[in-house]
Amino acid sequence: MKRHSLLILAAILLPAVIAAVTPEQRRKSDYYYMEALSRDAAGDYDVSTLLLRRAVELDSIGSTEPGGMLGSRLLSIDNGDSAVAADGLRLLEAHVAAHPADLYSGYNLALNYERLQMHGKMLHTWRMLDSLNSENSAVLMRRAAIENRYNSKQEALALLRRVETLDGISADLALKQAQLMIELGDTAGASECMRRMLDGMPADAEAHTFMSLFYDLAGRPDSAAVMLDRALAIDPACGMAFYARACRLRDSGRKEEYDAEIGRAIDLDDLDPESKLALLRDYVAAMPDDDAESRERAGYLFGRLTAQYPLDDEIRRFASGFYFAIKDYVRAAENLSVVADQHREDPQLWNFLARMYVTAGMMPEAVATARTAAGFWPDDIDVREMLGLLLSQTGLYDEAIGIFAGSLELPAAKTDDKLRSDIYRCMADVWQQAGRYDSTEVCYDRAIAIDPDNDLALNNYAYYLADRNKELSRARQMSSRSMTLRPGLPTYLDTYAWVMFKLGEYQTAKEYIDTALLRSADDLSAELLEHAGDISYKLNRNEQAVEYWREALDLEPDNERLFRKVETGRTED
């Protein structure tokens, strides 16, 4: 939820007490509360918050329910503002005090006490909730975790035993108790607890897996390994056991056995896809960055997994992320396209897929994806922008301009100056690529006239003028303004350096281009390096200039202009 100054001010100004409440005020308070619930259900949280505030103002004594709801809302948006948090706590505390049986609000109050590091009040609240919900296992488990972390392991253990009395023993509960016993020095008691659990579930694979985890905690690795073998003998498709055994092999440095275990898990028909993906996630996470062999094997395993579950959303997403990380953009896009086909309600996902196709050098697929997205969401400004930019990159300038011109007619653009300004900026960029410079300047001028703080329009226009040696004084002003609006952005620093270069102020240009290089150290572009070379050349630093040009040529080996500069050791002017 967005933090709005109006809401914060409303919270701070809430009266602590209203001395007398008339029946009319109480009736109005109830009305505002019911209206707030309606707005909340519709997702209109800002209006809902203001209505809650009004309900509490009218009846701050009797309206603990809207007060509790408002308190929770303020605590969720306090964003570190102590005054807002204090008001939120005051309202939520009043509601919990009036309605101690409201478990949800009490739970929320305790969590906020923990977030605000009010540990004494947090413990008191959990104990109160326990006293009122003594047979609620979820409350007992949460209180046990809190007691263990902030107060007493012995108290936490007593709470876990109460859960066992209520629900019976489970593998997870037994392991939690055993871990606490080990920390308290009662190894024998821990062993007896786990043995009791296993005796109650002798044919349960997960119970044997938990026993294995206990043996690892107790420093008995051989017994842990035996238990895992028994778990997999009981259920060869026990995902938890597979996961635990794979982790043991990985942590002990037995790479070949670990690789083989992951391969077996992926091929096992009865093992669920969630377990397979969890194993593969760990495999990728543990993979050294420079291990080409492991990367190749991981890619092979992903191929096998996606072949088994071709439409599994989570597997395809993770596969796409993996291939993107290793810079196999074609496979990344292929996997993401499967996800996009299943999510035709998500325009952002389709835009991301189009960008990924561009990264993979698959422009026809990128344009086709953007066209499809525009068909699904013809009124989505972002989708239309993506299509317009891709059309311009493929030389379809008139069609691109038509897309942007259509965007100007949408209701959102007619009521939003910043949006309309940015559409004109996009049109200017397209006209520039098309070599239609009169139209370029008209669109840039309109963009800046509508929104003088459109930093991207200011930067792009300044660079355009510098590149054409036109109105350099104006270009300098616009570039300076863009850097004021977005300080430290390497692209804007580069533009200013280029303007200063065109003005003949080479030393100033050098200072700004050096800063741009420093801020772009991990993602240098050929254009930035070429500018650095040209500026160095004008300062008679010829060897440095050639080195910059050579680096730029490495990034764009087909750039004939850069090739000539490297060959001749000079600029072309």
Image (tube, rainbow, N blue to C red):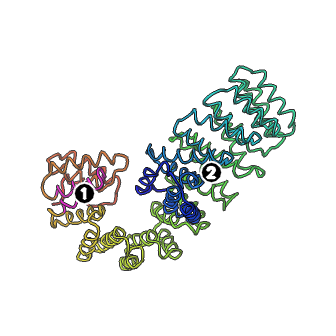
On the image, the x and y values in percent for residue 127 come to: 67, 35
Going by the numbered disc 2, the residue's amino acid type is Tyr
Above or below, 337 relative to 226: below
Q: Confirm whether the magenta stretch covers residue 403.
A: no
Is residue 322 at least partly visible in the picture? no
Above or below, 550 relative to 158: below
- What span is colored magenta in the figure? 475-501
On the image, the x and y values in percent for residue 32 come to: 54, 63
Q: Confirm whether the magenta stretch covers residue 489.
A: yes
Q: Answer with left or right where residue 544 lies relative to residue 559.
A: left
Q: Residues within 10 Å of mark 1 (few under 14, many from 20)?
A: many
Closer-to-camera residue (260/2): 2
Going by the numbered disc 1, the residue's amino acid type is Thr
Q: Quadrant of residue 215?
A: top right
Q: Secondary structure at mark 1?
A: helix
Q: Residue at x 24, y 46 (%)?
A: 514
Closer-to-camera residue (62/128): 62
Location of mark 2 (residue): 300
Label 1 to label 2: alpha-carbon separation: 44 Å
Is residue 306 at least partly visible in the picture? yes
Q: Residue at x 53, y 74 (%)?
A: 376
On the image, the x and y values in percent for residue 457 come to: 29, 65
Q: Main secondary structure of the magenta part?
A: helix
Q: Residue at x 30, y 72 (%)?
A: 428
The quarter of the rendered structure image containing the C terminus is bottom left
**Label 1 or label 2, whichever comes before in sequence order:** 2
Location of mark 1 (residue): 495
Q: Quadrant of residue 472?
A: bottom left
Farthest residue in the left direction? 504
